[in-house]
Amino acid sequence: MRDDEIKDSVIHDGAILEFGNRLYEKVGHQLHQHNYISQRLRELGRLLNAAKEQDRNVHSLEQCLYPQNWEVILSAVKSTAGFCAESGTYDSPSAAIKLGHSLSKCARMLIAKGK
């Protein structure tokens, strides 16, 4: 993984690391999947950075998933995926879908842990 602010966000967030560990347990035995895992973690790292820009009180992905931060995470997903309000389209619609699936998995993971 490239050494930048996205990597810093990933390695300092417990929920993202747990998500990565679960992905690694599932597909990590296949060497060609290592880049896939890295990409998914970087997507969540970019999302977390965008959420931190939207609201300085958000410090982790777990906090993003709190109901009171719904608008923050929604605008962070839109900015990460390149949403254009004028045309109602995304620069990268697949990024929004992938982020939604990853957030859903992280939420289920946190619920299972009792958080």
Image: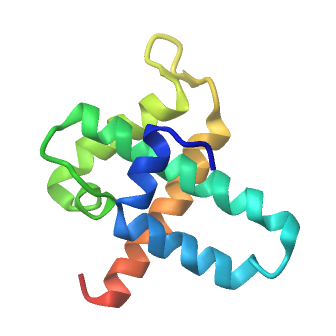
Q: Residue at x 28, y 64 (%)?
A: 62
Q: Quadrant of residue 53?
A: top left
Give percent across and percent down for residue 20: 56, 70
Would residue 77 appear left or right of 13 to someone viewing this image? right
The reply to whether residue 46 is in sight is no
Give percent across and percent down for residue 76: 37, 37
Would residue 14 appear left or right of 19 to someone viewing this image? left
Colouring of the image: rainbow
Give percent across and percent down for residue 98: 60, 52
Please count the marks in the image. 0
Farthest-out residue, top = 86
Farthest-out residue, front = 3
Q: Residue at x 51, y 21 (%)?
A: 88
Depth check: 20 or 47 in front? 20
Depth check: 48 or 108 in front? 48
Q: Residue at x 43, y 39 (%)?
A: 5
Q: Quadrant of residue 55?
A: top left
The correct choice, above or below, for 1 with respect to 89 in the image is below
Give percent across and percent down for residue 22: 57, 80
Q: Residue at x 63, y 50 (%)?
A: 1
Q: Quadrant of residue 75?
A: top left
The correct choice, above or below, for 24 with respect to 61 in the image is below
